[in-house]
Image (cartoon, rainbow, N blue to C red):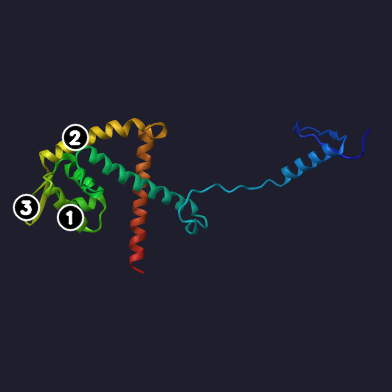
Amino acid sequence: MNDGRARVRSDAPGKVKAPVKVKDAAAKAAVRASAEFEEVSPVVSPLRILSSAHLAEGPHASLSEFEFGLIVCHNAFSRWVVRCMRAAGGHDLAVTDVLVLHHVYHRQRAKRLADICFTLNYEDTYVITYSLKKLQNAGLVAGEKVGKEMFYTVTDDGAAMLDRFRDVRAGCLLPAVEGELADADQLSRMAERLRALSGLYDQAARAASSL
């Protein structure tokens, strides 16, 4: 018996759709609900992991999501660098001290204060000056004045500590690098994006300082 109410079968695209008979009220309600769901499909916004929701409004909300990831990653990296250096014997070194020590040893060439600040993107030279004095007092870095400028190199004790740092890093960090992070090309592309974004923030800081 056809009660006059029917639904359209949608399993044969491109063909004439045959009516589907509905026998009872429950089935009719189910078909009606299904049709309404298909007509009005709710749009679910993606969940964003943030620490400052008030900055995540508008078309650039993803930038706030990136910034939160950057904050968390920066703090985790800083904590790792300090703990790794402690395991290598550098118990009183802060994250800036460790980064300066690594860069002074980079390619085993003497570095000027200006070189270190420029490469590590430190604006305040007194921060790096303090770290260099601290490293000199610890016997890890030596300074030699050439003309009007001071050039810094890593001592034998400093080089030995950096070798131990490398061993701890190889034992604790590198085995945990898996998946996409183990892809050298993927990491290189990520580093390129971070450098590009650092330029963006530098330019924005320059603009803000002129306000």
Which amino acid lies under the numbered mark 1 shown in the image of this protein?
Tyr
Residue at the (23%, 59%) spot, across then down: 124
Identity of the amino acid at label 3?
Lys
Q: Quadrant of residue 173?
A: top left
Question: Residue 65's spot in the image, x, y percent?
Answer: 46, 50
Query: Which residue is at the front of the view, 139 or 66?
Result: 139
Dot 1 corresponds to which residue?
130
Return the disc, 3 or 2, that comes first in the chain's sequence: 3
**Tag 3 residue:** 145
Badge 1 crowding class, 10 Å Cα cut-off, few under 14, some 14 to 19, many 20 or more, is few
Q: Earlier in the sequence, mark 2 or mark 1?
A: 1
Which numbered disc covers residue 33?
none
Depicted 188 relative to depicted 125: above or below: above
Gap in angstroms between the C-alphas marked 3 and 2: 27 Å
Residue at 26% over, 52% down: 121
Instruction: Classify mark 3: residues with Cα within 10 Å, few (<14), some (14-19) or many (20+).
Output: few
Question: Closer to the camera, 153 or 97?
Answer: 97
Dot 1: element: helix
**Front residue of 85 and 64:** 85
Image coordinates for residue 26, horizontal then vertical, percent: 83, 38
Label 3 residue SS: strand
Instruction: Tell whether 112 sits left or right of 169.
Output: left
Between the residue at mark 1 and the residue at mark 3, the CA separation in whole angstroms equals 17 Å
Task: Write down the residue under mark 2.
Answer: 163
The N terminus lies in quadrant: top right
CA gap, disc 2 and disc 1:
24 Å
Compare marks 1 and 3 and give the one earlier in the sequence. 1
Residue at left offset 26%, top offset 44%? 82
Amino acid type of the residue that numbered disc 2 sits on in the rendered structure: Asp
Pick out the residue farthest to the bottom: 211
